[in-house]
Amino acid sequence: MIMPSYKISAQEYIWNNIYSLDGAQFIYAKDNNYILISKKDGKSSVAIKSNNVWNITLKDIPEVRSIFEYNGAIYMLSSKDSNRAIYKSTDEGNTWSNILGTEILLPNNIGNNNVESIVISDEAIYINVNKQGIYVTYDKGQNWTNINNGLPIKNQTDFLSRNIWNIDGELYASTKDKNGLYKYHKDEGVWKPVKDLNGLPSGDAREVRDFVILNTTIYIGTNNGVWTTSALGDDPWVQVNGISGDIRKLLVLNGDLYAISKSAKQIYQLKNLNFEPLYNNIDSTLGDFLTFVIL
């Protein structure tokens, strides 16, 4: 199915089609240029737009799990079963080099398990591996250590971590199987729930898909809407009005919070403690929105 990608003017909220690519998955913007990642048949391709011209710079690589910027370079984690790569670009996506095996090594005991997320910081690299949990290296992968103490586990073998984030130097992880959000306490070497589950109903609201901190407020995107609590104190979780369903992505752009709903195929903006649809005039048959950018 063709899934067009759109951009929006932050001032006018007018949508314009920027590219149509079979299976559009992510779109990333840097210096008014676009990097668009598509997925088809379990593989990804990368196209960039510069000077109003699109060019495909990578084709049919293992499925891209994430794209992020670190120290001026752009990185992509590309992982499908045992087919893995970590691509790096220092020229805004025009050329890519696979740094897996050179700049970064992965643990040699992860087998065919997917590497689902990665965090690169000045002092360490963290990865989340399906079923095996979270690893850390301080020497670019020469040596890896499991840091799973405190994470929920299933059947005494499968760790249930889903995604990892580095926010202001602190490491966070969401978990599968409705276990909430965890923070890593480095001094103790243990993961602890960010908050207890007070206020969260049982079920899908506890399965965290994305997580942000805006000022001193925590927001989690879940399979049952967006929930919030203060990062300070022991306030209970409260559901944010105006949005429900499977929320796959939360974004903070220019100080505003946006949420992307998979099931509702909609983008929302938080206004006056309520989420409001950011548009009403895009054909709902276009497919699910996974991310968007404001330039």
Image (cartoon, rainbow, N blue to C red):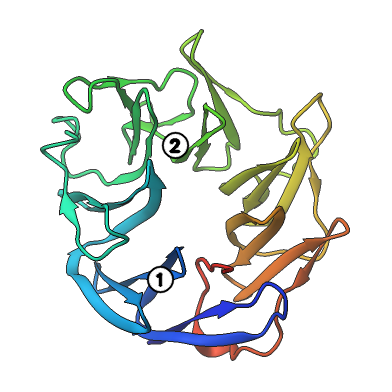
Q: Which mark is residue 34?
A: 1
What's the residue at 20%, 51% (across, down)? 81
What's the residue at 61%, 56% (across, down)? 251
Q: Are marks 2 and 1 in contact (CB under 8 Å)?
A: no
**Amino acid type indicated by mark 2:** Ser
Can I make out residue 134 in this image?
A: no
- Looking at the image, tell me whether mark 2 or mark 1 is earlier in sequence order: 1
What's the residue at 11%, 37% (across, down)? 102
Q: Secondary structure at mark 2?
A: strand
Q: Secondary structure at mark 1?
A: strand
What's the residue at 44%, 36% (across, down)? 161
Q: In front here: 246 or 156?
A: 246
Q: CA distance from mark 2 to mark 1?
A: 31 Å
Q: Which mark is residue 68?
A: none
Q: Which residue is mark 2?
A: 161
Query: Given this view, does label 2 or label 1 mark the residue nearer the observer?
Result: 1
**Amino acid type indicated by mark 1:** Tyr
- Residue 288 in the figure: left or right of residue 133: right
Q: Position of residue 35 (x, y in %)?
A: 36, 68
The quadrant of the image that shows the C terminus is: bottom right
Can I make out residue 80 in this image?
A: yes
Q: Name above or below for residue 215 compared with residue 15.
A: above
Q: Position of residue 86 (x, y in %)?
A: 23, 48
Within 10 Å of disc 1 (Cα), the crowding (few <14, some 14-19, many 20+) is many
